[in-house]
Amino acid sequence: MRRREMHTFSHKGIRPLILACLMMGCAQNAVADAVTHGTLVSRDEQGQKQDMPLVSTRVAMDITGSVLRAQVTQVFHNPTNNWTEALYLFPLPGEAAVDHLKMQIGDRIIEGDIQEKEQARATYEQAKSQGQNAALTEQDRPNLFHTSVANIPPGGEVTISIEYQQTLVWKDGRFSAGFPLAITPRYNPVQPGEVRRVVEGQATLNSGWQVLPGERKTVMATIGDDETAVSNTPGPVEISLNLQPGFRLSALDSPSHQISQEQTEDGRYIISLLADEPDEYRDFVLNWTPVESDEPSAAFFSEQHGDEHYGLLMLMPPQDLHTARFSREVVFVIDTSGSMAGTSIEAARRALQAGIDGLASDDTFNVIQFNSSTDTLFNQPVIADIQRRQQAASYINSLQAGGGTEMAPALTAALTGIRSNDDTPRLRQIVFITDGSVSNEQQLFDLIRSRLNNTRLFTVGIGSAPNSYFMEEAAVAGRGTFTYIASPSESESTMQTLFNKLEKPAMTDIRIEGEGIKDLMPSVIPDLYSGEPLAVSMKLANGTGEVRISGRTGDAAWQEALILAPADNTRGIMTDWAQRAVQDWRRGYLRGVSAEQIRSEIIALGLKYHLVTPYTSLVAVDKTPVRPEQEESETLVVPVAKPHGLDLGMAQGATGYQLTLAGGLAALLAALSLMIVERRRKSGSRWCA
């Protein structure tokens, strides 16, 4: 037997790699380093704490009929002795059309201008470098916006106000309005690849949870663990709402927060709340229901702007065209990743159990759970008999949250998995229960679109602050609907409402034609499920128009003709049309439109209608320099609020920590292998037994 040759390796090349892996492993400890006093802080590159600009937020909403107009005022305070730039990521409703920006410094008010995104950023950066007060509002997602405020003086304040509009739709017998108060951290899936070479480098680990990993400098506020700790939130949020519904109400309530309300003599409702405690940082939801005799069946609103007339038509199709029930194959997909830890996984388990309880005896079903990996309860969908329901109940009770949010494999399994093994014709439906905390949304939309076929995808939002953008767009790509469960106590009733929809066939092949109407938005009318209205915006060529609407439900056809006689007195209908047009072009990928054309069309709409879009931003600059040239400015990130019920200790999936650590270890092993091979090559020796 030949003697094994021994080699001695230098530690110089490997030390940086070991250090890098140890730094990755320390990330969890850095995240767990909670702030133990009430000042907002960040860390510099040396890991030292820095005071942060405090921010308070006031939201004033006016709702008239179906149009909501809101002003969001953010007050940035600089408690340091340095000139600072504040960066703040904040959520808004996904349908919000942001169209105004104001910056107030003392008594001066500067209005924002709409510019292409790159130009607006350049305008802001130039003003910042020249010592001028400046503000920039950009869109990162349709429901996530980012404000940058330059040159806040030592001890000074800058007030930023943005305005947005939202059109509310009557659905499931009620109207709803909401405002998000927190952001769930997003998981950024790591794309595996072959290690070909190792590059030495350095990394800086900052404390805090990343909200948009790899995109923004963002950090999530945490809470101290000693008795004197104060919730480290981005300041209180005050919401006031003036509601003029236009009809009598049978109910007005919020499933998410305790509210104060009063009714005025002229029929208005004044609602208010103050969110300043950790358990109040969840999405605010307000519902109001008309008395049964006042339930709307059709409504038309219009506005004239210059020579153009805009209209918004909302119509409730007949609900009893086809009463026959179809058997279904339902695949439940439940998110058990780390961001679902805490109250979210409890609500998800209850929702999943309620969904299975809602199955008929001739339905088939399966359950798929996912986190860093995917697991399926049955090899294929099984009949919903007592034995299989009991198996599912035991499986559901065992579900725990932890790990990453690797959503694509679970979606692929649900969309392309084995079907039921009988010959019964079935409606195939996927019920997807998640908080949607991923950052690779477009990749997942493309996956759904390419593999949907005759399946329909229904998303169910769970948690205090789900990623509503992903949930709504995934449902659009999946030709289904989005349902939000605002609190665990609503799980059963909300799932029952959803299953009442799923038992009935959708209205399909909806067409709108007529004289004097053009530029319908959306350009392709989606399928409508039970309890959902038809809502479409349009331009009217001569101020009037005649509309013919048709559709099918099962084997029954529906047609209706309407004469549109605009009053042109409803403010906001033009903005509603423009926002729907932006949304329609943003979804152009579903129709095969090129990315270049989508970008061009959205830029034109944003500039014409003064809207913040993925490609246009609002920027405000005070022309008078305030910061002396010899003084520097530092950039500080304002933490976003941690959603109520989110267990940061378990939400490693939100940052990709585990996969990052695994990647670091893999890189270390690859480096060792390469060094061994290189040594053997140079010495001409070989390993042998």
Image (spheres, rainbow, N blue to C red):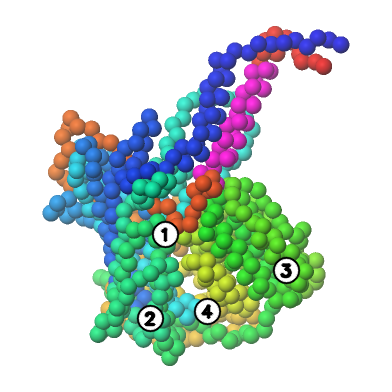
Q: Nearer the viewer, residue 8 or 177?
A: 8
Q: Position of residue 404 (x, y in %)?
A: 58, 47
Looking at the picture, which amino acid does disc 1 mark? Asp
Distance of label 4 from label 3 (alpha carbons): 29 Å
Looking at the picture, which amino acid does disc 3 mark? Arg
Label number found at residue 389? 3
Distance of label 3 from label 2 (alpha carbons): 47 Å
663 falls in the magenta region: yes
Q: Are marks 1 and 4 in contact (CB under 8 Å)?
A: no
Q: Nearer the viewer, residue 245 or 115?
A: 245
For disc 2, the marked residue is 300
What span is in magenta?
653-677
For disc 4, the marked residue is 531
Measuring 62% from the left and 70% from the top, which residue is drawn there? 354
In this rendering, which labeled residue sits more in front, label 1 or label 2? 1
Q: Earlier in the sequence, mark 4 or mark 3?
A: 3
Which image quarter is the C terminus in? Answer: top right
Task: Spot the residue most to the front.
Answer: 227
Which image quarter is the N terminus in? Answer: top right
Distance of label 1 from label 4 (alpha carbons): 32 Å
Locate residue 287: give its quadrant.
bottom left
Q: Residues within 10 Å of mark 3 (few under 14, many from 20)?
A: some
Q: Position of residue 513 (x, y in %)?
A: 47, 78
Q: Are marks 1 and 2 in contact (CB under 8 Å)?
A: no
For disc 1, the marked residue is 279
